[in-house]
Image (tube, helix red, strand yellow):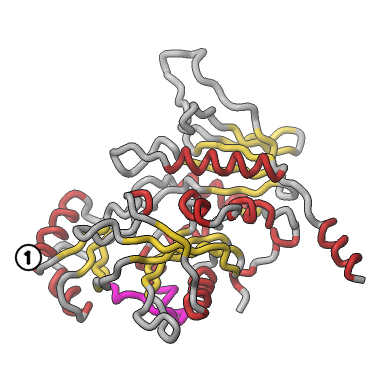
């Protein structure tokens, strides 16, 4: 009987197409960022080793075509660094399109990693295209719902708190003269954290504020250049490190400790130079990370938290949930994590099983 069960499980597994959507030429920061190219190469290498067809397309210039009851994605090609090659309007015979990529909900997974940040690097049409795929019953990772929630740190905080999780006290600032009210409601002392609810990248967009004078000036400056920029203040929790946990359908795939960059900084982003290492979760930390993923309808996400002083008995502080986590840093600590993700979806049962909503 055990051999028969094993055969049934294996019979469900088969290769598939993975189409990764990028937005390579719209980086928020004005410095070189190698993370996109590193992730591209990691996914290419892993897909090849697992027998999965992988394609990369860019939202810029993308369009969908249909012919003979079949559907195709059309995208500009990429250069050797993983960035889309845009056509020169003066060169009528310049850059063309890649070969059309045939897609079908029966054998294709859509991975929209380039949806960007609402109000900054996102185009509503891109979101609508992915939503259209969902309505056609394509599996999209992340889903539009998951991306929408995680695109807002404030909304993510609301969902996490409603799920019974512990998060830093967080208050939105709705206009430039709202700082004193917001700080009073935060019910803490300086220093505090000031961040944009959307639009931060690799830790940039998050600052520490030491006084009301600095808070007033910083908020006024931000609102001067972007009147409707969503801004938050948050209690500052002093720590030497935070933790990133990768969750897939209610299972912890890996976790890593990220040291604070230096004595003069408080951020722990690996892309900014922070050191990372393997980290063993307590039962409470693993449980709350899984709950955080489920609370934002996430199937494959990265959960970031600051551990409690008594890790065995107290809940951690959930900082945010990333709907499009990078795998480069944690792959170096847990070899084979990316392969485990791609192999998981060879089982077609895992395409329709929405474990993110299970209790």
Report the front residue among 286 and 354.
Answer: 286
Residue 45 visible: yes
Q: Is residue 2 above or below residue 201?
A: below
Q: Position of residue 288 (x, y in %)?
A: 48, 76
Q: Secondary structure at mark 1?
A: helix
Direction from residue 295 to residue 65 in the image, left or right: right
Q: Is 65 in the magenta?
A: no
Residue found at x 15% / y 52%: 224
Pointer 1 residue = 213
284 to 349, vertically: above or below: below
Q: In the image as oriented, which residue stretches furthest toward the bottom?
A: 313
343 left or right of 291 in image: right
Q: Report the front residue among 26 and 261.
A: 261
Q: Which quadrant of the rendered structure holds the C terminus?
A: bottom right
Q: Identify the residue at horizontal 46%, vertical 52% (top origin).
A: 329
Would residue 136 be visible to someone looking at this image? no
Magenta stretch, residue numbers: 158-171
Residue 304 position by quadrant? bottom left
Graded by Cα atoms within 10 Å as few (under 14), some (14 to 19) or many (20 or more), the crowding at tag 1 reads: few
From the top left corner, tell me how far across and down residue 200 is, in percent.
32, 54
Toward the left, the furthest residue is 213
* Residue 306, above or below 85: below
Quadrant location of the N terminus? Answer: bottom right
Magenta stretch: residue 164 in it? yes
């Amino acid at each position: 009987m055990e051999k028969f069960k094993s055969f049934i499980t294996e019979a469900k597994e088969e290769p598939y197409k993975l189409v990764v959507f990028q937005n390579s030429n719209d980086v928020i920061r004005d410095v070189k960022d190698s993370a996109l190219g590193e992730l591209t190469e990691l996914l290419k290498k892993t897909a090849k080793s697992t027998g999965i067809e992988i394609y990369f397309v860019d939202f810029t210039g993308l369009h969908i075509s249909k012919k003979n009851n079949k559907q195709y994605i059309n995208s500009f090609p990429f250069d050797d660094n993983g960035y889309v090659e845009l056509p020169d309007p003066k060169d009528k015979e310049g850059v063309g399109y890649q070969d059309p990529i045939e897609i079908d909900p029966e054998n294709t997974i859509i991975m929209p990693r380039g949806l960007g940040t609402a109000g900054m690097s996102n185009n509503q049409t891109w979101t609508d295209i992915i939503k259209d795929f969902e309505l056609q019953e394509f599996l999209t990772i992340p889903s539009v719902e998951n991306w929408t929630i995680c695109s807002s740190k404030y909304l993510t905080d609301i969902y996490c708190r409603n799920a019974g999780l512990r998060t830093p006290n967080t208050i939105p600032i709705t206009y430039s003269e709202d700082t004193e009210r917001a700080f009073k409601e935060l019910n803490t002392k300086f220093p505090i954290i000031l961040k944009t609810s959307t639009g931060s990248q690799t830790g940039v967009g998050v600052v520490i504020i030491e006084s009301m004078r600095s808070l007033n000036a910083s908020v006024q400056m931000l609102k001067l250049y972007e009147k409707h920029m969503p801004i938050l203040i948050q209690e500052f929790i002093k720590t030497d490190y935070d933790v990133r946990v990768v969750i897939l359908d209610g299972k912890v795939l890996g976790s890593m400790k990220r040291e604070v960059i230096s004595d003069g900084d408080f951020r722990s982003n690996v892309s900014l130079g922070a050191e990372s290492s393997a980290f063993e979760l307590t039962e409470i930390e693993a449980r709350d990370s899984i709950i955080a993923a489920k609370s934002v309808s996430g199937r494959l996400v990265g959960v970031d938290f600051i551990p409690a002083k008594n890790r065995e008995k107290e809940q951690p502080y959930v900082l945010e949930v990333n709907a499009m986590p990078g795998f480069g840093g944690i792959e170096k600590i847990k070899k084979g994590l990316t392969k485990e993700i791609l192999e998981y979806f060879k089982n077609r049962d895992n395409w329709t099983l929405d474990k993110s909503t299970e209790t």
